[in-house]
Image (tube, grey):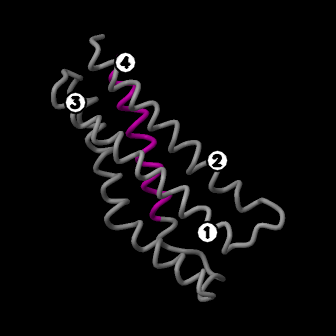
Amino acid sequence: MDGTTAAIVAITFLWLGMVLAISFLEAPLKFQTPGLDLATGLSIGRIVFRALNTVETFLAIAIIILVSVGHPGTAARWLLVAAVAVLAIQLVAVRPALSRRSDAVLAGEGGDKRSHAHLVYVAFELMKVGLLLAGGIALLA
């Protein structure tokens, strides 16, 4: 494995670990904290996910650059490009809807029903996890 591919592997699994830790561990556990109200949980979540998405963007840019100058296999290349595309869709289409929803809840409106945008975001997170895992494995194969 050359240095460029090793760097892509490291970035891919770093990104995967961050998504798993934040989206599937920290986020749901936060709302099980005794005494933490919905507004505080949403406020914390906005800060955490803004930071996660910022780091994800830098990792995605690094992957795009390294994939374009390196020689990962075709399968790995397309799986990682798809993961980057999923992130882009989340940032451009889903995050704004989530922000509007959390703004409304923080303003005291509509906190009693489940957010459709949240379910869409989770579906995209699951896709991204699958693509990053498959891309990382393809790089190692």
Helix, strand or loop at label 2? It is helix
Contact (CB < 8 A) between labels 3 and 4? Answer: no
Asked whether residue 114 is drawn in magenta, I would say no
The residue indicated by pointer 1 is 42
Image location (x, y in percent) of residue 10? 41, 25
- Front: mark 3 or 1: 1
Which image quarter: residue 11? top left
Extent of the magenta region: 120-141
Q: Earlier in the sequence, mark 1 or mark 2?
A: 2
- Front: mark 1 or 2: 1
Q: Earlier in the sequence, mark 3 or mark 2?
A: 2
Q: Quadrant of the N terminus?
A: top left
The residue indicated by pointer 4 is 140
The residue indicated by pointer 2 is 25
Image location (x, y in percent) of residue 132? 40, 37
Q: Is residue 109 left or right of residue 53?
A: right
Q: Which mark is residue 67?
A: 3
Q: Earlier in the sequence, mark 3 or mark 4?
A: 3
Q: Is residue 114 left or right of residue 8?
A: right
Given the image, on which type of amino acid does mark 2 rest? Answer: Leu
Gap in angstroms between the C-alphas marked 4 and 2? 26 Å
Helix, strand or loop at label 3? It is helix
Gap in angstroms between the C-alphas marked 3 and 4? 14 Å
Q: Is residue 19 above or below residue 30?
A: above
- Front: mark 4 or 2: 2
Q: Earlier in the sequence, mark 4 or mark 1?
A: 1
Gap in angstroms between the C-alphas marked 3 and 2? 29 Å
Contact (CB < 8 A) between labels 4 and 1? Answer: no
Q: Is residue 108 left or right of residue 131?
A: right
Residue found at x 71% / y 54%: 29
